[in-house]
Image (cartoon, rainbow, N blue to C red):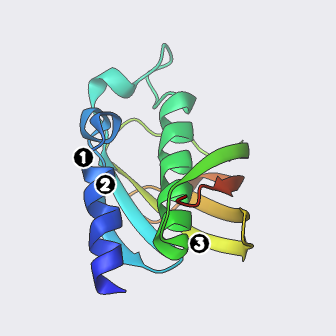
Amino acid sequence: MKDLLAEVERKFAESPFWQWLGLEAHHIIPGEVQLKLAIRPEFLNVVRSVHGGVYASVLDTTMGFTVRSQAGCPAVTVNMNISFLKATDQGNLWSKGRIINMGRNLAVAEAYIYNDEGQPLAHATGTFKIIHSK
């Protein structure tokens, strides 16, 4: 299992989007992942808080990583629902994902984003199609 988790982390770390965004993996076990993103000025919107699209990207990536950490193969987002709870403009975004339900072909996951003080900033649930190797 340790080799699988290392391979999953390596695949995500090689992603050009992951690298551009600046995500860092902090905790990975099957079905549970924690990521960190340092807030940069280019993430801020016209009201000078982190753009909701950044939140959405972090939540989607966290849930996808979480699903893959348990399924052992890629998964793609089918549906995602987000609740934006609080704005921020500095520090780090910490995300934590977990599996709600894992089937053979579909998984349901959830993720939260927290600030450095542990206050929730956003919550999402998502359904993911598991892509089995042929």
The residue identified by callout 3 is 98
Neighbourhood count class around disc 2 (C-alpha, 10 Å): few under 14, some 14–19, many 20 upward: few
Q: Is residue 117 left or right of residue 86?
A: left
Image coords of residue 60 (percent x, y): 56, 47
Instruction: Give the quarter of the image for residue 109.
Output: bottom right
Q: Secondary structure at mark 1?
A: loop
User: Does 57 appear above or below 46?
Assistant: below
Spot the residue most to the top.
46
Give, as a three-letter code, the residue at label 2: Lys
Q: Is residue 118 left or right of residue 63?
A: left
The residue identified by callout 1 is 14
**Mark 1 and mark 2 residues within 8 Å of each other at the beta carbon:** yes
Q: CA distance from mark 1 to mark 3?
A: 22 Å
Image coords of residue 3 (percent x, y): 28, 80
Give, as a three-letter code, the residue at label 3: Arg
Using the image, tell me which numbered label, if any, was put on residue 11.
Answer: 2
Q: Residue at left 56%, top 65%?
A: 67
